[in-house]
Image: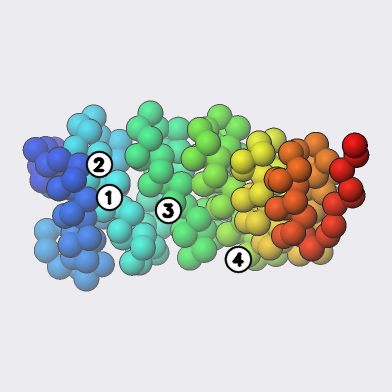
Amino acid sequence: MTGAGILAATMSSTKAADAAPLIADAIVAGTGEHNLADHATALSDGNKNTMALGAFVFDEVIKRKPELAAPHIERVIRLFNSDNARVVQTCAHALPELARVAPAKVAKHLPKLSAAFDQGSEPAKEGVVRTYAALCIASVAYQRRLIELLEAALTQADEKTLPRWTEIILPALKGEPHAQARAVVEGRLYAVSRPVAQKIAGFLGIKLRPASR
């Protein structure tokens, strides 16, 4: 059992959440007995308390210094399909930040990310969309590689999700990829409910046609 596992074995979720900021501070400062590798490993531990502490600590380290988690990118992507919803949430929050600070390392795993989008839960899909948007912001070179998936995401998004993904994806794109994604969104405006369409149209800066009576 890792140091993280020993610490978490009898720790409740509430206590883990309370302890995580202090542990993350020590990891970032390079002091104390804790290291991020132990907590990254804990994300796939069979003990739910160990897994919870690993997730909370990973969250806090990402907030403070995301580049420290770069060696664990492959694990983060693999755990997008974890059975533990808390772990998926942690990975979905972490990877967009990792794409911002280490885009090339994240981009090495694009096939796995695409699979995570196709097979994943809603939080996993959200994480992939945000990660791809972060890659597009980091470098325009990624836009042509990712536009097909981003278009698919906008096409598949339900009414609750479409406005949010529109606001994430379109600002991350430029030129032809932006035009392609915008065309997908505009093409859905009259297929979704009027309130949703109004919200999206406001973001796009366009007016909807009057509703037919």
| Foreground pick, 50 / 188 | 188
The CA span between labels 4 and 1 is 27 Å
Residue assigned mark 4: 138
Q: Earlier in the sequence, mark 3 or mark 1?
A: 1
Residue placed under numbered mark 1 in the picture = 56
The residue lying furthest to the front in this view is: 213
CA separation in Å, label 2 and label 3: 15 Å
Q: Which mark is residue 94?
A: 3
Structural distance between the alpha carbons of marks 4 and 2 = 31 Å
| Image location (x, y in percent) of residue 142 | 68, 57
Q: Earlier in the sequence, mark 4 or mark 3?
A: 3
From the top left corner, tell me how far across and down residue 10 is, in percent: 9, 38
Image point (25%, 39%), residue name: 51
Marks 2/1: CA distance?
6 Å
Tag 2 and tag 1, C-beta contact below 8 Å: yes
Label for residue 52?
Answer: 2
